Image: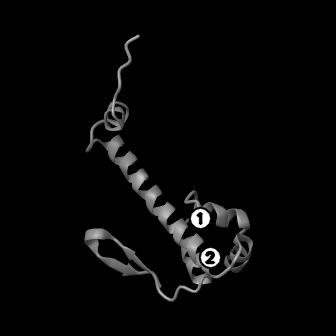
Amino acid sequence: MNVEYRTLDEMIDLHLGKRGTPVREEFEQEVKDGIETYRLGEAVREARKKQNLTQKQLGERVGVGEAQISKIESGKAATFGTFNRVFRALGATSGTLDLGSLGRISLW
C-alpha cells in the first residue's frame, strides 16, 4: 500500500487554493477572526475569575444567560456590542481596538 503524505499547507492549497486567491483569503481571515475572538474570550474568563464571579453572575450583570457567557469565553459566539457590555460589566474603564496599520481606536 502506497500512502502519500502531505503537509497541512499542501492540503490547504489543494482544497482552498493558493494564498492570494479569494477563497483562501476568506479562509485565512476566518481563522484570524476566530483566534482573536478566542483571545477575547480568554480575557473575559480571566477577568471574571479574578473577580470571583460565576458565568451566571456575569451573565446577570450583562443581561445575557450563563450559556452566552460560556460561548463568549470559549470564543464561539459574540458580537462587538456584547463584548463591549461584558468588559464594562467587569469594570473595564477603557477599551481600545488595534486596527493594525490603521492605528488604534477608542471603544469607550
Q: Residues within 10 Å of mark 1 (few under 14, many from 20)?
A: many
Quadrant location of the N terminus? top left
The circle on residue 28 is none
Disc 2 from disc 1: Cα separation: 10 Å
Residue hosting label 2:
48
- The reply to whether residue 2 is visible in this rendering is yes
State the image quarter where residue 20 is shown. top left
The residue at the point 69 percent across, 78 percent down is 53
Q: What x and y, as percent, mark residue 49?
A: 63, 75
The residue under label 1 is which amino acid type?
A: Glu
* As drawn, 1 above or below 15: above
Q: What x and y, as percent, mark residue 75?
A: 55, 60
Viewer-proximal residue, 53 or 19?
53
* As drawn, 108 above or below 25: below
Q: Residues within 10 Å of mark 2 (few under 14, many from 20)?
A: many
The residue at the point 59 percent across, 64 percent down is 72
The residue at the point 61 percent across, 80 percent down is 50
The circle on residue 73 is 1
The residue at the point 37 percent across, 13 percent down is 2
Q: Secondary structure at mark 2?
A: helix
The residue sitting at the bottom extreme is 93
Q: Secondary structure at mark 1?
A: helix
Mark with earlier residue (2, 1): 2
State the image quarter where residue 51 is shown. bottom right
Tell me whether circle 2 and circle 1 mark residues in contact (CB < 8 Å).
Answer: yes
* As drawn, 4 above or below 85: above
